[in-house]
Image (spheres, grey):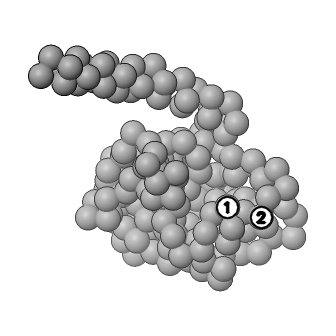
Amino acid sequence: MKFLKWFLIVIGALALLFYFVAMPYLKEQTKKISPQKTAVYNMNGIDLHVSYSSPFKKGRVIFGELVPYGQVWRTGANEPTVVINGSPVNIMGQELPAGEYSLWTIPGKDEWQVIFNKGIPPWGVTILSGGKETTRDPKDDVIQITLPAIKLIEEVESFTISFEETGALYLCLDWDKTKIRIPISK
């Protein structure tokens, strides 16, 4: 009985040590490999702020291998990508109310599903799955749309989120030789 008590105390102490020391250290190290970036748009009554981690290609095959087709991706590295909008916006006929959202995608060879979710989990994937399972809860999805995957001629080394205005406003996701354009309006 005494052994069991000490065993449980040691296990509890190790779990706390992992949670409060090892996890923050691991998060800091991963941000050196995939730096935190932001994209901001504040014009025409639209106020958007996107925070994401930007992994690098480094000679790897990205879509279909590193990021599998048909599976939910946290859309970047480390924590989920977070979109903050100061006022409601319209995305392909669907209203995204003002607030904070996580951005998830399901890449496909020819088209992608883009998901705005009201839950923002502390990490984008489960540790026990080795990064293969995301922490997104589908019941918190606010918007889910399907968009064509645009093939780029030039390779994009670092995953990049940006805003593009070409007659309309788009939130763009670029990496490797793929671009996704999410139309946004007031």
Q: Outermost residue toward the right?
A: 154
Q: Is residue 12 above or below residue 74?
A: above
CA separation, marks 1 and 2? 6 Å
Q: Which residue is mark 2?
A: 61
173 lies left or right of 184 = right
The C terminus sits in image quarter: bottom left
Q: Earlier in the sequence, mark 1 or mark 2?
A: 2
Disc 2 marks a residue whose amino acid type is: Val
| Count of all numbered marks drawn on residues in the image | 2
- Asked whether the beta carbons under mark 1 and mark 2 sit within 8 Å of each other, the answer is yes
Q: Quadrant of residue 164?
A: bottom right
Residue 76 location (% of width, % of height): 59, 51
Q: Is residue 59 above or below residue 9?
A: below
Q: Which mark is residue 137?
A: none
Disc 1 marks a residue whose amino acid type is: Leu
Residue 122 seen by the camera: yes
145 lies left or right of 6 = right
Q: Which one is nearer the viewer's eye here, 36 or 124?
A: 124
Q: Residue at x 64, y 59 (%)?
A: 173
Residue 122 location (% of width, % of height): 39, 39
Residue 13 location (% of width, % of height): 31, 18
Q: Quadrant of residue 19?
A: top left
Q: Which mark is residue 66?
A: 1
Q: Secondary structure at mark 2?
A: loop
Q: Is residue 110 above or below residue 132?
A: below
Q: Which one is nearer the viewer's eye here, 127 or 94?
A: 127
